[in-house]
Image (spheres, rainbow, N blue to C red):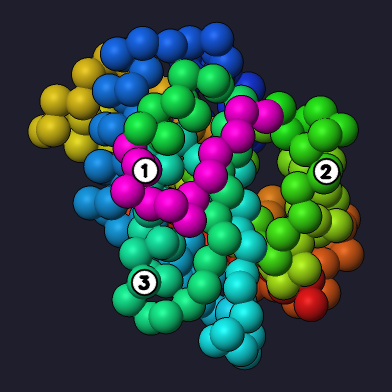
Amino acid sequence: MNLTVDTTYRSDLPEIMDDLDMKGEQLRDTLDKIAGLNRKLGGNSLTLEGVKQLIKKIPMEQEIRIVDVGCGNGDMLRDLADFGDQTGRKFKLSGIDANEDTISYARKMSLHYPDISYSCQNIFHPDFEKNQCDIVICTLTLHHFSDSQIISLLKKFRKQSAIGIVINDLHRSAIAYRLFQLVCYVFGLGAMPTNDGLISILRGFKKSELRNFSRKLNFEKYSIRWKWAFRYQWIISTL
């Protein structure tokens, strides 16, 4: 058996969840398992910390519009809504995903969160650019796209966001790959989350690649930090 994992370049292997017509219990179970694992590993906190950093100089009475691109089951938006309730921050929260069944499930999971709305949209469609906001957040979503698509998306995000962008995504690492295999075994995540999770790591990023994106896009105010568990927190100010 070949024990080596080549992480030199980003993989272009498709994930099962890339099928935008996918629906049903398997999809919803996978969304829940991804959200649960992300929470256990502290993943949501990285996005929340990024939002806190961007808004620390924004007046408390100002409503902040946040769009979550690739919102999944809405877990991150519910965390933001809870943070707003706890601190008195006023948020207008919107979740966007290209899978109609995913959006339907996110709405169901967020019935008690009146400040969250959801929309099924293809972010490469011109209508997506009408989503003007203060902050765009992107948690474990950017790796689904090719480098050229990422450049295109980040150009849009910059135009849309009055305050900034928070990217939370995977560090492409052989160690991360092997550790995730162990996590899948220990927690019994099942075939689909295991398959997509391992491919996600291979589609993740090196810090130098995120810096190259920043240079190509002429981002002036940004930070890229490695965080546990094998994540990059990329905060871009558009102020």
Q: What element carries label 1?
A: loop
Q: Position of residue 112 (x, y in %)?
A: 32, 48
Q: Are marks 2 and 1 in contact (CB under 8 Å)?
A: no
Q: Position of residue 13 (x, y in %)?
A: 57, 18
- The type of residue carrying mark 2 is Glu
Label 3 and label 2: CA atoms lie apart by: 29 Å
- The type of residue carrying mark 1 is Ser
Q: Earlier in the sequence, mark 3 or mark 2?
A: 3
Location of the C terminus by quadrant is: bottom right
Q: Where is residue 62 in the image (x, y as percent from the top left)?
A: 62, 80
Picture residue at 36% right of the left edge, 58% below the top: 79
Q: Residues within 10 Å of mark 3 (few under 14, many from 20)?
A: few
Label 2 and label 1: CA atoms lie apart by: 25 Å
Residue 129's mark? 2
Q: How crowded is mark 2: few (under 14 residues within 10 Å), some or many (20 or more)?
A: some
Q: Relative to 211, is 117 on the left or the right?
A: left
Q: Residues within 10 Å of mark 1 (few under 14, many from 20)?
A: some
Magenta span covers which residues? Answer: 109-121
Q: Which of marks 3 and 1 is nearer the N terminus?
A: 3
Q: Relative to 220, is 171 on the left or the right?
A: left
Q: Name the residue under label 1.
A: 110
Of 175 and 18, nearer the camera is: 18
Q: Visible in this render: residue 203? A: yes
Q: Name the residue under label 3.
A: 85
Query: Compared with residue 4, is residue 91 higher up or lower down, i.e. above or below?
Result: below
Picture residue at 82% right of the left edge, 67% below the top: 219
Q: Position of residue 161 (x, y in %)?
A: 75, 62
Location of the N terminus by quadrant is: top left
